Amino acid sequence: MILVTGGAGFIGGNFVLDWLAHADAEGIVNLDKLTYAGNLATLSPLEKDARHVFVHGDIGDKALVNQLLEKYRPRAIVNFAAESHVDRSIHGPAEFVQTNIVGTFNLLECAREYWNSLETQDKEQFRFHHVSTDEVYGSLSSSDPAFTETNPYKPNSPYSASKAASDHLVRAWFHTYGFPVITTNCSNNYGPYHFPEKLIPLVILNALNGKPLPIYGDGQQVRDWLYVGDHCSAIRKVLASGKLGETYNIGGWNEKANIDVVKTICSILDELKPRTDGKSYAEQITFVKDRPGHDRRYAIDASKVERDLGWRPAETFDTGIRKTVQWYLDNPIWIEGVVSGSYRDWLKQQYN
Ligand code: NAD
Ligand code: DAU
């Protein structure tokens, strides 16, 4: 088996579904705390699949993690569990420190003890794959080259600082203890099962509900968008063939300004589900107060993973965003499930 943490969230959920869609896949023990971002509905296709064992719990719970490692004897851990939303980290950083730093520390320590107890061959095969972000590298100007794996860490938000700290712990566990880690630093993901606090799903749902489409600041901030299925395939590849102790940047080669992303979503919706008044959804675009410390541009140079492991994304932004918009149109039940009271409270707090 493999142990996946945070597998009820956006990327972890996609990863679990994708992994188990392969007939010869090993089973998954999925440890997730089910915070507001965790959603068992994402995993409902696996209800009768004995290869998936869901465990409700915290990566910071030492006794529980030890017990799971002892019981299921995984040959790898893929760590997705995190607090992941920059805006929430600005309102309340404590949970980010707790899960992203202390939680990762706990997971590393439990895993190291387990790994030390393995027989030589199992020990050699074991992997701890840490899923991280491009935000640890800080912000680029429009003329800077894209982030490579050798860029210095310059995190700017409580979220990215907490992820940077976790990356440092993972790195140190390799160098100090020889513990077999690999880290991937990925750019902005989008696709099915994305919680609608993040730009793309928020804009799709607000558009359909006749609400404003909030653009922070001037909307010229640039992100490098990767379809979530491509992130899953990259993690599979790195887990199978990545070199221990290395980090790999994962990105979509799809740099877009936020305003252009939102306009693209509007024009796809104009085509697939036109407004009843005949106007474009773009009429709902509203510029709002900027995010404090808002990073201007992220861009990933994903040449290393292509050169060393032969991975490249399959989707372009045009193909991926169309699939994504269509998915939100086709899945109203999943959406109803996430748009709960606590979600409405968040919108009120953030957008007033
Ligand atoms: P998400 O917020 O959608 O999901 C996080 C999941 O982790 C949720 O299911 C939540 O319940 C769970 N979780 C939170 N705290 C936990 C804890 N203490 N113990 C166990 N489970 C816990 O996040 P996501 O967007 O799917 O991101 C997954 C990982 O990928 C994160 O580590 C994030 O930093 C990283 N990442 C995300 C993106 C992106 O664009 N979303 C890009 C690069 C890297
Ligand atoms: O770069 C990888 C990161 O991408 C991940 O590590 C994070 O977990 C993930 O949340 C994401 O962070 P961002 O802050 O880039 O994503 P978000 O969807 O929140 O915002 C994308 C851009 O859109 C960003 O420049 C802020 C802007 N934005 C966001 C929201 C929610 C708006 O203009 N309006 C909004 O309402």
Image (cartoon, rainbow, N blue to C red):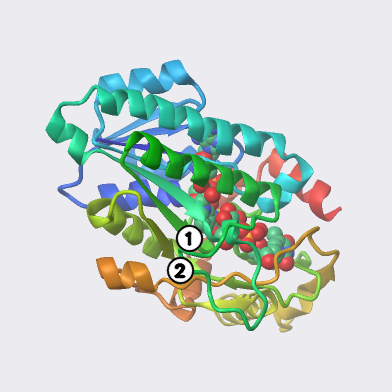
Q: Give the numbered dot on residue 251.
A: 2
Give the percent coordinates (x, y) of residue 42: 45, 45
Residue 295: percent from the left, percent from the top? 70, 65
Q: Does the closest atom of ligand 2 sit within 8 Å of the Cβ of label 2?
A: no
Q: Is residue 211 above or below residue 126?
A: below
Q: Position of residue 57 (x, y in %)?
A: 48, 25
Question: What amino acid type is highlighted by mark number 2?
Answer: Gly
For residue 212, above or below residue 165? below
The residue lying at 64 percent from left, 36 percent from top is 97
**Res 306 quadrant in image:** bottom left
The x and y percentages for residue 232 are 36, 57
Q: Who's the residue at 66% across and 34% down the image? A: 95
Q: Describe residue 28's horizontal placement relative to residue 148 as left or right.
A: left
293, 56: nearer the viewer? 293
Answer with the quarter of the image where residue 78 lies: top left
Q: Nearer the viewer, residue 301 or 53?
A: 301
Against 303, residue 68 (above or below) is above
Left or right: 333 as drawn, with respect to 31: right
Report whether the residue tagged 1 is closer than 8 Å to ligand 1.
yes
- 290 versus 120 height, above or below: below
Q: Is residue 95 in view from this perspective?
A: yes
Q: Quadrant of the N terminus?
A: top left
Q: Residues within 10 Å of mark 1 (few under 14, many from 20)?
A: many
- Residue 186 image label: 1
Residue 334 at least partly seen = no
Circles 1 and 2: CB distance less than 8 Å? yes
Q: What's the CA distance linking mark 1 and mark 2? A: 6 Å
Position of residue 352 in the picture relative to residue 196 (left or right): right
Residue 304 marker:
none
